[in-house]
Structures are given as structure tokens and as C-alpha cells.
Image (tube, helix red, strand yellow):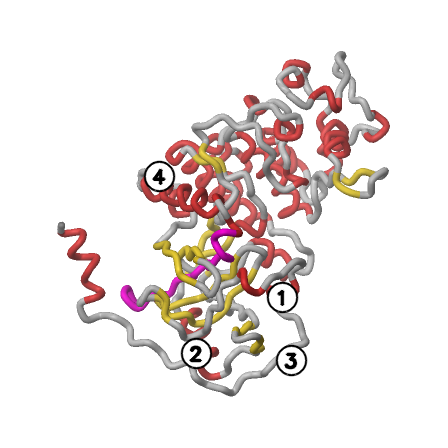
Amino acid sequence: MLSSFLKSLPRLGRRWTPLNFTNQNFTRIPTSHAIEEETIPGYVAGRYFPTRIGEILKDRYQVVGKLGFGVSSTVWLARDMDYRRYVTLKIFIKSTTMGQQLDDELKIYKRIESAPRNHAGRKYVRSLLDSFDISGPEDKHRCLVHPPLWESMLDFLFRNPVQRLPTPILAVTLHRLFLALDYLHTECKIIHTDIKADNIMFGIADDSVFRDFENDELQDPCPRKELDGRTIYTSSVLRTPKDVGAPVLCDFSSAVMGDEQHTEDIQPDIYRAPEVILQVPWSYSVDVWNVGCVIWNLFEGGSLFSGQDPEFKAYRSRAHLAEMIRLLGLPPPNFLARGNHTKKFFSEEGDFLTGELVGEHVPIEQRETSLEGEEKEMFLRLVRKMLQWEPEKRSSAAELEQDEWVQTELRK
């Protein structure tokens, strides 16, 4: 009862007063010029909720400005007037288009929220503050409310001229990521399945970033266009905070429950684990393989695997497997024996059917070019702990968090 009383306090006199976003001094974009979500192939206006800057949703969240857009949602900065804080609103396209995915993602967040909170990795997993449905012109739209974050690791890389993370930042990022995964795997029983640079975001420890964003929209409104009764706004960016927070693992739209058996296809193409390609039952260790591949993007400035098939000029599983063999050698027979799709790629004797794609063996030592000496050896030992054919031989997230290279870099 005390908890419920305390939660009600913000409504008892500390509520923010709504702001007036009526400044008409903004650039009007021609209706013939496609912008933002309109540029997405197959865009249909009616699928998107016609959000307006300044409007108040759920009698509580006042929209301040647009942060981004995607195929399935738009993201907005808002003022939580009840709790006098800034939040982000992820507003999905209409619910009938999204189907079961909406409820599946919400179940994942609810499982995270109900898990123990004393684990060190909890604070490196993005939390859900609230969720609700809003009625649009054609259908309902799901809205997820999150604490606001800064930019993604991918954005951070693009702003770096060499597009590589410095060693200290990589070590900190991996340490927090391993803690987050250990929390998800052991406490929440969740497999993320979609770990990539744009799903790792930096926190913000200074609210002035959001106040500046808000003031910019009040004084110099973003460009926009009016079309068929809806306003399409251009996205604005948050300025660089003076104090960048820790990296946080985000986006659980593809996550699954770890206490269920899985053989379905998951992961972005270049990050697919071998058991996913061969349809061996998979579990938490797919996330570990995923991180091993992401390291290469973050630190080496390129992808460890591409899966580009020279015959088809596109991604193909056989080309991806060939690259794995080139790096790791042939997979063990007992692993191949478990795959429902093994016969598509390997003979009864375990030979790769399209061996001409493999080429000459290139050990991982030749692929790593950023480090030297003992530091390089320690780093490669870390990578090898993740890039193993057999899922059982990969280290757990808890073991990787204590890895020698990670801990040595953190102590520097």
C-alpha cells in the first residue's frame, strides 16, 4: 500500500504543465518531396500513427520531438508530466499489421521487469517504463515507453573517421554487454538473438541534453510537411552529452524465451550462428556467437563473415558456411549429425559439398590487424571462446565477463 501511495505522489501537485508548441516559424517541405518514413519501400501512410509534436498521449506524455523512424515504428522524445522526467515513446505501426509480434515483445519486457534486480547486468538492459495502446484513424497502435538514451554504437562508429572503437571503449562495451547477457540468460531466461551495433546504445547522465532538445523545438521548430491531414516531421538529434552513460542493450523485438526449444531461423544474416544455419536446436550460446562476430565490426572495421555467394551475387548459407570453414576448419561430425539441414551442405563423410567456395585456410591471427604481441594473443583467445562450432564449447556470458583481456583493459 505504501508503494502505491508513493507512486501516486507525482499526481498530487508536482505535475509538469504542458508546453505550447505553436511556433509556426518552421520550414515547410513540399508535399512532392518524400521524407523520413515515406522513403521506406512499401510505405503506407495509414499504417503509421499521425503523431503531432505537442500532443499529449494517455493524458500524461507530451510529445517534444521526433528522434527517428523505421519500418515498424517511429520514436519520439516526450515529457512524462506525472513524474517530471523525459522518456522516449516507440509508437508502432497499426496493430493488425504487426500481429503477434507486439504481444511477444511486451511479454519479453514484462519478464525482464519481473526478474531479480540485484544482478550487476540489470542496469545494462533497457527497461520498459510503461506500455499502452492508442487509437489511430484506422486501428490501434502500441506504444512502449523507455528511459531515453543517446545514440547507438553504430552511429558512434560512423562519427569516428576510422570507424573502429578504441580499445578501452571496446573493453568497457564488452564488459557491460557480457553482464547484460548473463542477466538475460540466467535471471530472465531470455535469448536476445539480434545483437548488433545499432542495438547497443549509450546512456545519458545529464538531463540538460533533453531540455536543450525541447528548447530547440520550441524556438526553432523542425522542418515538416503537411499531407492528407497528417504532419510528417524530420527527425532531430540529441546533442552530445557532457557525460555519456554506459552502453545499454536494446530492442527485444526478436528476443525469445530461453526455457523453450528453438530451431527457427534467427539473427541478421552475417551474424547467424552455425547451429541456426544447419537447424541444430539452439539456445543461449547463439548470443555468444553473435557477440564474437559483432566484435569484428566494432574493432576491426569490417565483418568477419559476409555470406556473399559469387554465383548468386547475394547472401547464401553455403557461402557463409564456407567462410566459417576457411576460418575455423571443418565442423565436428557429432555437431553435423544434429542438424536437420546438414545434408544440404555436407556429405555423409562430413565433406563440404561446395568446397570450391572455401579456398585457402586463413587463421584468425591473420585477420586481426589492430593489436600486437601478448595483447593480440589475449584478444584472440577471447574471440575463440565465442567462435566455436559446437555451442557447448563456447564460454558463457558470465565467463566472458571475467576474461583476461577484458579485465586487463578495464584495469588500465
- Discs 4/3, front: 3
Residue ID for mark 1:
38
Answer whether labels 4 and 3 touch (C-beta < 8 Å): no
Q: Does residue 293 appear to the left or right of 238 in the view shown?
A: right
Residue ID for mark 4:
119
How far apart in space, not on screen, are marks 2 and 4 (Cα)?
37 Å
Label 1 vs 3, first from the N-terminus: 3
Amino acid found under the numbered disc labelled 1: Glu
Amino acid found under the numbered disc labelled 2: Asn
- Discs 1/2, front: 1
Which residue is depicted at the point 78% across and 31% down? Answer: 362
Amino acid found under the numbered disc labelled 3: Pro
> Would you call the spot at circle 3 few (<14 residues within 10 Å), some (14-19), or many (20 or more)?
few
Residue ID for mark 3:
30
- The magenta segment is 80-96
Q: Position of residue 76 (x, y in %)?
A: 47, 65
Compared to 399, does 255 lie above or below? below
Amino acid found under the numbered disc labelled 4: His
How far apart in space, not on screen, are marks 1 and 3 (Cα)?
13 Å
Of the numbered discs in the image, which one, if any, rests on residue 289?
none
How far apart in space, not on screen, are marks 4 and 1 (Cα)?
42 Å
Label 2 vs 3, first from the N-terminus: 3
Residue ID for mark 2:
215
Answer whether labels 1 and 3 touch (C-beta < 8 Å): no
How far apart in space, not on screen, are marks 1 and 2 (Cα)?
27 Å
Label 1 vs 2, first from the N-terminus: 1
Q: Position of residue 328 (x, y in %)?
A: 71, 27
| Secondary element at image label 2 | helix
| Secondary element at image label 4 | loop
Give 148 or 367, whichever is nearer the viewer.
148
Label 4 vs 1, first from the N-terminus: 1
